[in-house]
Image (cartoon, rainbow, N blue to C red):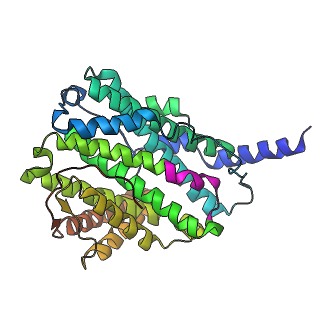
Amino acid sequence: MNMHNSAHDELHAEVAGQFDTTAMATETTLLNPRFYTTDFDEIDRIDVTPVRKEWDALLAQMKSDPNKGHFKKTADWNQIDWEGMEPGLKREFIDFLVSSCTAEFSGCVLYKEMKRRGNNPDICELFSYMSRDEARHAGFINDALREAGVAVNLGFLTKAKKYTYFRPKFIYYATYLSEKIGYARYITIYRHLEAHPEHRFHPIFKWFKEWCNDEFSHGEAFALLMKTDPKLTQSFVNKLWIKFFLTAVYSTMWVRDHARPEFHKALGVDIEWYDQEVFRKTSTISRQIFPIELDIDHPRWKPRLRAMEAAFRDMDAAKRQGGIVGRLKGWAAGARATLAFAALYTIPVKRHALPASVRLEPSY
C-alpha cells in the first residue's frame, strides 16, 4: 500500500466531512454570490453602433485570448500542506475559494445563457468570450479545492442554485461592479504579495495578475454596453440605482471580508485598509461610466460599515441560537443592518462629467 496516498485520502475524507463545499455554494444568502437570469431578448436588441470602434477593439483583444495558456499549473504551483494548515485559516480560505468559484461560475452560466438565447452577432460573440474566461477561472479555483478533497460539484450547482431575476440594467450595474471590484481585489492582493512573498501561503495568488486582467476586460464590455444608452447612467432614477448598487457591493464586501480575519491575517493585510484600497481603485475606475462615486472618506462611512458588520455578526449568532428568542434577535439585528445601510446610502456622492471614451487599460 502507498502510505502517502493513504494518508492523503484520509485527509481528503476528513476535510470533505468538515466542508460540504457544494452545499456552501448552493446556499442563497444576502452575502453569498448569486446566479442571475434576465430579459435576454432585451439584451439581444442592443445596438453597439454608438461605440463600434471601441467595441471592435475590445472584441479583437478578447478573441486573441491572451490568457489561453495561463490557467494551468506549472512548476510555480507548489504543493500545500492542507493537514498542517491552521484550522481557522483553512476554514476561511476554503470559504474564500468556494465563494470565488461560485461567483466565477455564476458569470459563466449567465454569459453562456446570453450567448445561447441571442441572435445578435455582436452580443453573442462578446458573451462567448466572457463565458469561456469565467469557465476557466471557476475550473482553476475548483482544481485548488480538489487538492483539498472538497471540489464543488458545478454541474449540480447549475441545477440546484436558486436564480435571481434582474432587469438588464441591473445586470449591467451589478456585473460591471463585480468585474471591476474583482480586478481591484485581485491586483491589490497580487501587488501586496509581490512586495511580501512570505505571506503567499498558497500558489493560486501567483496567478492573480493575468487573471484580474480578464476581470478588467469584462468590466470594459459592460461599460460599453451601458454607453450605448446614455439614459442608463444619466437619468435621475438610474443615478439612484447606481448609488444603490455601489453601496450594496461595497458594504457586502466589507461584511464578507471581516468574516475572514484569519485569512487576511495570513495574507498580512489589515482588512479595513484592504477594503478601502479596493474601494478607492474601483471608484477611480468606475469614473469611466458612472457619473457619481461614493464618498468613502466621509465621517459616516467607516462607522456605519462597522455597524453593519456587527449587525450581520449578530444575525448569524441569532440564526445559530434558533427558537423564538433567536428569531427576535435576528429581526432586531436585521433592522440595525437596514438602518446602517440607509445611513451609508444617504451619504452625499461625488459627481463628475463622463469622459468621451470609456475605454481604460489596467494600470495598477
Magenta stretch, main secondary structure class: helix
Q: Quadrant of the C terminus?
A: bottom left
Please give left or right for residue 341 compared with residue 185 in the image.
left
Magenta residues (range): 200-210
Q: Residue furthest right?
A: 1
Between 224 and 275, the one nearer to me in the picture: 224
Between 81 and 158, the one nearer to me in the picture: 81
Asked whether residue 159 is drawn in magenta, I would say: no
Q: Residue at x 48, y 35 (%)?
A: 135
| Residue 76 position in % (x across, y down) | 68, 51
Please give left or right for residue 143 compared with residue 225 in the image.
right
**Image height of 42 relative to 199, above or below:** above
Between 154 and 112, the one nearer to me in the picture: 112
Q: Residue furthest left?
A: 236
| Residue 42 position in % (x across, y down) | 19, 29
**Image height of 8 relative to 345, above or below:** above
Q: Residue at x 25, y 62 (%)?
A: 338
Q: Residue furthest bottom?
A: 299
Please give left or right for residue 58 compared with residue 235 in the image.
right
**Image height of 120 relative to 52, above or below:** above
Q: Residue furthest top?
A: 119
